[in-house]
Amino acid sequence: MQKPYFTIKKGDPEPLKAVVSRRVRFEETDPLGIVWHGRYPGYFEDARVALGEKYGVGYLDLYNNGIIAPIKKLHFDYYRPLRLMERFTIESIFHWSDAARINYEFIIRDSTNEVATTGYTVQVLLDRDNNLFLAPPPFFKAFRDRWRSGELK
């Protein structure tokens, strides 16, 4: 078993989750019918968008509240290939952080429900002038307060 990407400390709220189902399209594969490695950031993005929409912290929610959230770190671990026309799922897991950042873990499962790829992203929070927030800005703090209180499941 691989080491967890993010440490869950005692007292942290449970991670938030969303799952997206997809099918491998022709344009996503190489000549052998295997998903090209450069497509995986888009798969992570599909799940990240679904989770953001589910909990009200999507890109436009952040932007409309003066927050930009660029990716600082992106990591993949590949285990099994996905193939042309295969159905698969992407699970996004939003991990709690006391810092002004967003930690997402991703699990891609193939059509047999085997783990095909895992990975994570770390996003920082900036204001619209590209200044780094050192503490969570009000909108993000309010979201985290709802999360910690158990309002979000």
Image (cartoon, grey):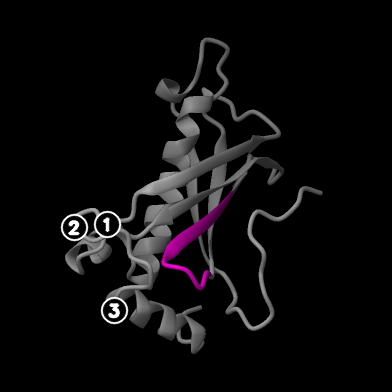
Residue type, label 1: Ile
Q: Magenta stretch: give its range.
A: 97-106
SS at circle 2 = loop
Q: Which of the two labelled residues, at mark 3 and mark 2, occupies the earlier sequence position?
A: 2
Q: Say which residue appears at 54% left-offset and 70% top-offset.
A: 96
Residue 31 picture location, percent across and down: 52, 10
Amino acid tagged 2: Arg
Viewer-proximal residue among 116 and 105: 105
| Depicted 55 relative to depicted 39: above or below | below
Q: Is residue 54 above or below residue 121?
A: below
Residue under pointer 1: 68
For marks 1 and 2, give the CA distance. 6 Å
- Magenta residue check for 62: no
Looking at the rendered structure, the secondary structure element under dot 1 is loop
Q: Is residue 54 left or right of residue 66?
A: right
Q: In this rendering, would 75 be left or right of 146?
A: right
What separation in Å lies between label 3 and label 2 (alpha carbons)?
14 Å
**Mark 1 to mark 3 CA distance (whole Å):** 14 Å
Q: Based on the displayed image, in which of its 4 quarters is residue 8 positioned?
A: bottom right
The amino acid type found where label 3 is placed reads Pro
